[in-house]
Image (spheres, rainbow, N blue to C red):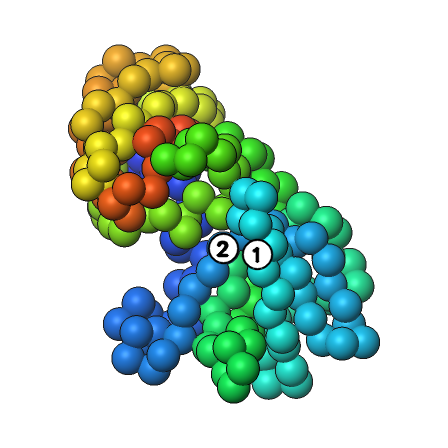
């Protein structure tokens, strides 16, 4: 049986699957932050990430779980600009203590993240994994199973989401087609369901890839 599986490419929120759920994070006083690596001081056990023009310091220790999509990650091999997700708790003195650090080093994920951007209400441009700091709700991807039979290849589409002050998506503009009008229409309908923090961003750019296989 041949079955088309279509998958949206915004994978940032999936990076923490298997670590801790949103409810568990809220109940246990944990918080999640997304950014790009600026520097890692292994002697002081501090990692510095940036979100737009802002920089944030997180302390880590021997209990911090450090990994990447490919498994264990060595801090001495993490380069500046690498995407990272940090699950942290606030300790005494408002110090952020990292419970989990997960890096994005996979080439395909990095390519996807390079296409993601957002314009804040202050006019600042946020790129890559840091955009997920502004996401309130990402609709489930299960609606993408099935659909028309497509060629066996990836074909990225690119979409611009206009975001209202309340965080809802007011409109979606196609910037680059996937090559399939039906798939473009499905993507636009799906992206209109996204929700962002109120009064945070005015526009968000998201890519969408598809793939299919035989089963």
Q: Quadrant of residue 69?
A: bottom right
Residue in the image at 23% along x and 41% along y: 167
- Local SS, label 1: strand
Residue in the image at 48% along x and 73% along y: 88
Q: Is residue 131 left or right of residue 40?
A: left
Q: Distance between the residues labelled 1 and 2?
A: 6 Å
Q: Which x, y percent locates residue 149?
A: 28, 24
Q: In this view, does 103 lie to the left or right of 89?
A: right
The answer to whether residue 24 is visible is yes
Q: Quadrant of residue 49?
A: bottom right
Q: Which x, y percent locates residue 53?
A: 58, 44
Q: Nearer the viewer, residue 178 or 201?
A: 201
Residue in the image at 28% along x and 26% along y: 162
Q: In this view, does 1 lie above or below 78?
A: above
Q: Name the residue under label 1.
A: 84
Q: Name the residue under label 2.
A: 34
> In what quadrant of the picture does the C terminus appear?
top left
Q: Is residue 176 left or right of residue 149?
A: right
């Amino acid at each position: 049986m041949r079955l088309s599986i279509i998958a949206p490419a915004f994978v940032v929120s999936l990076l923490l699957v298997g670590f801790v759920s949103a409810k568990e994070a809220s109940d246990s006083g944990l918080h999640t932050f997304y950014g790009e690596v600026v520097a890692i001081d292994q002697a002081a056990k501090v990692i510095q990430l940036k979100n737009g023009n802002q920089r944030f310091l997180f302390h880590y220790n021997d209990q911090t779980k450090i990994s990447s999509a490919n498994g264990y990650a060595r801090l001495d091999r993490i380069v500046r600009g690498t995407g990272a997700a940090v699950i942290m708790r606030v300790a005494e003195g408002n110090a952020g203590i990292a419970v989990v650090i997960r890096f994005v080093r996979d080439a395909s994920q990095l390519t996807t993240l390079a296409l993601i951007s957002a314009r804040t209400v202050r006019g600042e441009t946020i790129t890559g994994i840091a955009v997920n700091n502004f996401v309130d709700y990402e609709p489930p991807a299960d609606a993408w199973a099935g659909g028309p039979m497509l060629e066996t290849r990836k074909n990225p589409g690119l979409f611009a989401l206009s975001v209202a002050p309340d965080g809802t998506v007011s409109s979606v503009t196609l910037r680059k087609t996937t090559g399939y009008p039906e798939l473009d229409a499905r993507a636009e309908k799906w992206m209109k369901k996204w929700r962002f923090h109120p009064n945070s961003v005015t526009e968000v750019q998201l890519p969408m890839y598809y793939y299919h296989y035989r089963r």
